[in-house]
Image (cartoon, grey):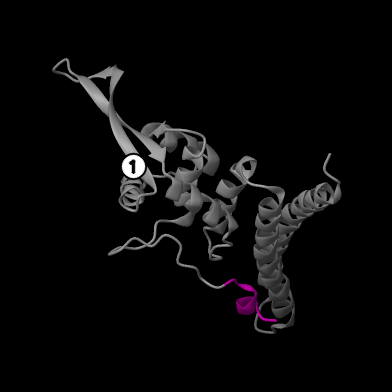
């Protein structure tokens, strides 16, 4: 089976009429956070920055257009409220919007959690957001998410493993250059193996939990 055949079909989840689909990871994050109750935009921005890490910045120019699209789709609603902690230069209290999830938004959350998504360089971000929402879904969905990510990493590992064979058999590569190319491939394989081992442990634990009879 080729690497291309290992990839899931591209799914068009949540396409906005007249525009392109929001990034699945960001859309999932917003509806997932609102599953726990209403939130302000600034709080959503702060939480997703903690999830994505210090070197992956989500701009306001990305988040707020996404929120507006979700509101246009009827997935969330908003209401303005006065913010007693923020006062303008003229002495007026500023307002902030409070966002709430609709029933359609709840349905979208579960649909996005079940959907494998499209494998891409950004797929780890989607996995990270899904992992942060495991408390909102049952073990069967959690297991599927872990297995999808394992498949993604396996494809990448196989790519570098095949690359080692090609580098070793290529007579046009000088020996000194070959050692450094192989070092890079070995680094990636080592990283993938560590994550795959972690995933395998989680997958086995979930399967064992599912086998246990309910009390």
Q: Position of residue 18 (x, y in %)?
A: 27, 64
In the rendered view, does 7 fall on the left or right side of 98?
right
Above-or-below relation of 150 to 34? below
Q: Position of residue 111 (x, y in %)?
A: 53, 56
Of the pair 108 and 25, the residue shown nearer to us: 108
State which quarter of the image contains the N terminus: bottom right
Name the outermost residue toward the left: 90
Does the stretch in magenta take in 3? yes
Name the outermost residue toward the bottom: 171
> Could you tell me which secondary element the residue under label 1 belongs to?
helix
Does the stretch in magenta take in 166? no
Say which residue label 1 marks. Answer: 60
Q: Quadrant of residue 180?
A: bottom right
State which quarter of the image contains the C terminus: top right
* Mark 1 residue crowding within 10 angstroms, few (<14) / some (14–19) / many (20+): few
Question: Does residue 76 show up?
Answer: yes
Above-or-below relation of 79 to 86? below
Which stretch appears magenta? 1-8
Above-or-below relation of 141 to 51? below
In the rendered view, does 78 fall on the left or right side of 127?
left
Q: Position of residue 20 (x, y in %)?
A: 35, 63
């Amino acid at each position: 089976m080729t690497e291309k055949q290992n990839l899931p079909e591209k799914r068009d989840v949540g396409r906005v009429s007249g525009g392109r689909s929001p990034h699945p990871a960001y859309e999932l994050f917003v509806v997932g956070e609102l599953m726990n109750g209403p939130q302000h935009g600034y709080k959503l921005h702060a939480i997703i920055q903690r999830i994505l890490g210090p070197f992956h910045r989500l701009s306001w120019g990305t988040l707020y257009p996404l929120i507006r699209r979700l509101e246009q789709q009827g997935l969330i609603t908003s209401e303005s409220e006065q913010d007693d902690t923020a006062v303008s230069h003229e002495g007026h209290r500023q307002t902030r919007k409070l966002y709430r999830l609709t029933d359609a938004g709840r349905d979208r959350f579960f649909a996005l959690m079940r959907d494998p998504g499209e494998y891409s360089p950004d797929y780890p971000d989607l996995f990270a957001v899904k992992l942060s929402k495991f408390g909102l879904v049952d073990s069967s969905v959690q297991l599927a998410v872990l297995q999808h990510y394992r498949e993604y990493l396996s494809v990448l590992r196989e790519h570098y493993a095949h690359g080692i064979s090609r580098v070793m058999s290529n007579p046009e590569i000088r020996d000194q250059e070959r050692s450094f190319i192989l070092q890079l491939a070995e680094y990636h394989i080592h990283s993938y193996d560590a994550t795959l081992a972690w995933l395998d442990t989680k997958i086995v634990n979930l399967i064992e939990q599912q086998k246990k009879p309910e009390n």
